[in-house]
């Protein structure tokens, strides 16, 4: 029976039970996708409300308390419950076993555990809207504010714990799978870029998540059982938290970036029908370089936090050096277009959109990296605009593009290209209006996390533009959703390999049967996932 | 551009070789002259905008050219990738890496110069103490005068603010002077600025500190020196009378 389609001869209850108790990596992947898209929808709604509030000076639709809760939820959910699970939960789970020619993950039951830990995290996060003392500590949770607030800091801590635990379990599983479950002939030199990047991302998760878990646990102890890790009046230090937090959370943006890049490479190679340009440079220089540098730059989040001057200078240099591996990834990506045969389907449009968004996002990171410049723009809307370009929106484009790319694989049906392209176009226009203008607002001095801006009333015109852009994004997202529902309900049947890809995931049926491959593929000497045009 | 990369590479080599930031210092300022931080910031930011725009345009132009030139012309068509020799493959990694690194180190050296100026308090700066609190800026002058949310200073004198916080983290941000630094309980930080001429400048909190965060603002009022002296004398008297 097919993976995603509900067969008519089974009752709904039976099907539901099958899905809940599933240990099939494809279904687990789909359930991750559903959870993370739900988080995206709620957090996206929060973004719209935030933008309405900031549309004009003075209180517009709410009060600062509620606003701060919205902003907390928007940031925390977008990162912890949408992007990381969509990339390392949905995409890694769904694709890695198929790409390496395995019948499932190494530990299917453990996989189900990490899925349900993630869902528990989603539920706990959503409690924000139910409890009276909603958290208001932003996604960073800095003490002493997070210790003094009447908001529920514990909810934040537990959300982080559940998501982190889920990621650690998933990481062990994925790394083992990649190491030991590859089909005969799938050598390390022929691994898909996405598989490499997932491996890199999970190595980072395993190294750094425990640090974040420790930091938020100390927060919990300080607030609720009277320890003094972060309380200077009893010998603690407020900066300890920021160091621990960013020691994880900077690498976390590479946990997001690497699989994003990986998927963009897959989509680009498939629709450009071209080999990945300089594969070894991309893997060793790009992915390897990012992994190596990721843990040496966290102070760039603390440039105005009173850290010693010498370390601010040192981490400025290491931060600037990140441009080297990231630049190599971009060269690999753009090089893949050289002498290609590019077909502009919806997923390919998202990949192309990614190149431009990431270019703007990456280059506007340089002012932030340069300590002297950052002293003025740190914690302003410039940073918010920058990180939405480089991480929030770029990655969301990669995720949406991947959903279109895998739509036939997951559902056995084709989506409608016109609707898909329309959704892309509207969103692309919207994000540029919103986030470019946001950077301008920031350069003019407006700090972030502001409920109101009396002192920057002259920026109201720009804020109008940002809000209009946000609404255009909202319309784009609605069209995307409609195109998916339309594809599910009315899409025509997909053939096994609709994109004529050479990669292994397209060698099996669409959708793939339980166990994926019957028999496991044997990959010949001259096979390569990107072996086009030979 | 090329000259800049070469300079950057050369400068960085010297810096690496000597391990000394001294080379990054700008020459030609007479001792005791007060550096123009906002001017230096604007200058560097402008230079940076040119740098990133050039890089961005190069990448974008090549991408657009490829996207148009190499679109699929008939169904089933595949790319015709050139074979990279091992030397070319290594070259494509090492040469761009070196170019990026040269630009990085060039920018780092420029930033280093300005940063050192921002962090070096000029001699004879007028010192004010600041305690942040939810939600006010509380200033204390050398002569014991205290003000809230209003920092009066003599124009034409560099001002250094030594700060800490009573409760949570705040951040003292003066957009006009391009400086900001956090105020933390249990730690003392500093920031200095130079109001050349009389005028008013905004202070605004840049670290999330709760409900009133966005309204936690203040004003710097730079006054003529003699007016400032008159004001502080009057304040001193008033506080002595009030306190006695
Ligand atoms: C859908 C369109 C989106 C819009 C219109 C939007 C808008 C905003 C706005 C207005 C802020 C608050 C700025 C401030 O006052 O500090 C914000 C913050 C943030 N956004 Fe988004 N956003 C969007 C999507 C995303 C996505 C996809 C992510 C995924 C990572 C994301 C992550 C964040 C984070 C982490 C923050 C910071 C929250 C904090 O300050 O703690 N956003 N966004
Ligand atoms: Cu404050
Ligand atoms: Cu504040």
Image (tube, rainbow, N blue to C red):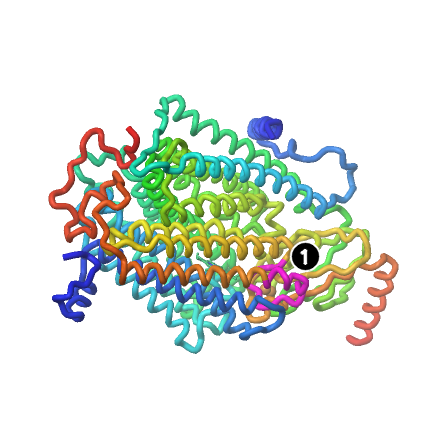
Question: Image point 39% across, 26% down: which residue?
Answer: B89
Rendered view: A54 above or below A240? below
Which residue is at the far front? B74
In this view, the residue in front, A462 or B167, is A462
Q: Which residue is mark 1?
A: B174
Rendered view: B22 above or below B234? above
* Residue B31: % across, % down: 78, 38
Is residue A235 within the magenta segment?
no
Horizontal side of A437 relative to A151 (left or right) equals: right
Residue A18 quadrant = bottom left
* Residue A53: % across, % down: 55, 69
Q: Is mark 1 within 8 Å of ligand 2?
A: no
* Residue A352: % across, % down: 43, 44
Per the rendered image, the range of residues in magenta is A446-464
Neighbourhood count class around disc 1 (C-alpha, 10 Å): few under 14, some 14–19, many 20 upward: many
Regarding mark 1 in the picture, which secondary structure is present there? strand
Residue A291 quadrant = top left
Is residue A463 within the magenta segment?
yes
């Amino acid at each position: 029976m097919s993976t995603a389609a509900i067969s008519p001869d089974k009752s709904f209850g039976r099907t539901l039970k099958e899905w809940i108790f599933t240990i099939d990596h494809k279904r687990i992947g789909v359930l991750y996708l559903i959870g993370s898209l739900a988080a995206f929808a709620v957090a996206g709604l929060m973004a719209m409300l935030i933008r309405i509030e900031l549309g004009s000076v003075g209180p517009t639709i709410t009060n600062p308390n509620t606003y701060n809760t919205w902003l907390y939820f928007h940031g925390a959910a977008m990162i912890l419950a949408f992007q990381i699970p969509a990339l390392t939960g949905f995409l890694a789970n769904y694709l890695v076993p198929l790409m390496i020619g395995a019948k499932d993950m190494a530990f299917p039951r453990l996989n189900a555990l990490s899925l349900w830990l993630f869902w528990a995290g989603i539920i706990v996060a959503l409690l924000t809207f139910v409890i009276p003392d909603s958290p208001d500590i932003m996604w960073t949770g800095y003490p002493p504010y997070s210790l003094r607030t009447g908001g529920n800091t514990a909810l934040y801590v537990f959300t982080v714990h559940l998501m982190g635990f889920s990621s650690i379990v998933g990481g062990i599983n994925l790394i083992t799978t990649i190491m030991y479950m590859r089909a005969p002939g799938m050598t390390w030199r022929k691994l898909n870029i996405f598989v490499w990047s997932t491996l890199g991302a999970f190595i980072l998760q395993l190294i750094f998540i425990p640090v974040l878990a420790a930091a938020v646990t100390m927060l919990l102890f300080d607030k609720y059982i009277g320890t003094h890790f972060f309380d200077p009046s009893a010998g603690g230090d407020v900066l300890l938290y920021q160091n621990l937090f960013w020691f994880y959370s900077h690498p976390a943006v590479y946990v997001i970036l690497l699989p994003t890049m990986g998927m963009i490479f897959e989509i680009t190679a498939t629709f450009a029908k071209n080999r990945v340009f300089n594969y070894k440079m991309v893997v060793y220089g790009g992915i390897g370089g990012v992994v190596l540098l990721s843990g040496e730059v966290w102070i760039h989040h603390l440039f105005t936090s009173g850290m010693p001057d010498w370390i601010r200078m040192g981490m400025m240099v290491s931060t600037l050096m990140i441009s080297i591996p990231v630049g190599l990834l971009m060269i690999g990506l753009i090089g893949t277009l050289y002498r290609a045969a590019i077909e502009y389907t919806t997923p390919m449009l998202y990949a192309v959109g990614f190149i431009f968004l990431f270019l703007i996002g990456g280059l506007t990171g340089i002012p932030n990296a340069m300590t002297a410049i950052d002293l003025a723009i740190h914690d302003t809307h410039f940073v918010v605009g920058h990180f939405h370009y480089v991480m929030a929106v770029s990655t969301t484009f990669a995720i949406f593009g991947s959903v279109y790319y895998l739509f036939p694989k997951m559902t056995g049906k084709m989506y409608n290209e016109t609707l898909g392209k329309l959704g892309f176009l509207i969103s692309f226009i919207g994000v540029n209006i919103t986030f470019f203008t946001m950077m301008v607002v920031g350069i003019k001095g407006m700090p972030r996390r502001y409920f109101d801006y009396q002192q920057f009333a002259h920026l109201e015109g720009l804020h109008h533009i940002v809000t209009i852009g946000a609404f255009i994004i909202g319309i784009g997202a609605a069209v995307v959703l409609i195109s998916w529902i339309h594809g599910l309900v009315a899409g025509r049947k997909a053939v096994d390999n609709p994109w004529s890809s050479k990669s292994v995931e397209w060698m099996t049926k669409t959708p793939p049967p339980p166990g994926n491959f019957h028999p496991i593929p044997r990959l010949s000497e001259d096979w390569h996932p990107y072996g086009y045009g030979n | 551009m090329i000259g800049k990369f070469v300079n950057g590479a050369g400068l960085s080599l010297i810096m690496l070789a000597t391990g000394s930031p001294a080379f990054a210092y700008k020459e030609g300022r007479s001792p005791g002259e007060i550096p123009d931080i906002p001017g230096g910031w604007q200058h560097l930011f402008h230079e940076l905008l040119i740098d990133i725009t050039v890089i961005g345009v190069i990448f974008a132009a090549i991408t657009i050219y490829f996207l148009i030139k190499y679109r699929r012309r008939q169904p089933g068509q595949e790319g015709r990738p050139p074979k990279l020799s091992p030397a070319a493959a290594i070259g494509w990694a090492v040469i761009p890496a070196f170019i990026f690194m040269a630009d990085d180190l060039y920018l780092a050296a420029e930033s280093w110069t300005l940063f050192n100026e921002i962090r070096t308090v000029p001699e004879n700066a007028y010192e004010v103490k600041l305690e942040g609190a939810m939600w006010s800026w509380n200033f204390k002058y050398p002569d014991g005068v205290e003000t809230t949310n209003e920092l009066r200073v003599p124009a034409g004198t560099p001002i250094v603010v030594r700060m800490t916080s009573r409760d949570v983290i705040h951040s003292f941000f003066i957009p006009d002077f391009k400086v900001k630094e956090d105020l933390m309980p249990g730690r003392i930080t500093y920031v200095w600025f130079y109001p050349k001429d009389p005028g008013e400048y905004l202070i605004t909190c840049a670290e999330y500190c709760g409900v009133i965060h966005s309204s936690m603002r203040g004003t710097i009022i730079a006054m003529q020196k003699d007016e400032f002296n008159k004001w502080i004398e009057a304040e001193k008297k008033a506080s002595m009378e009030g306190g006695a």
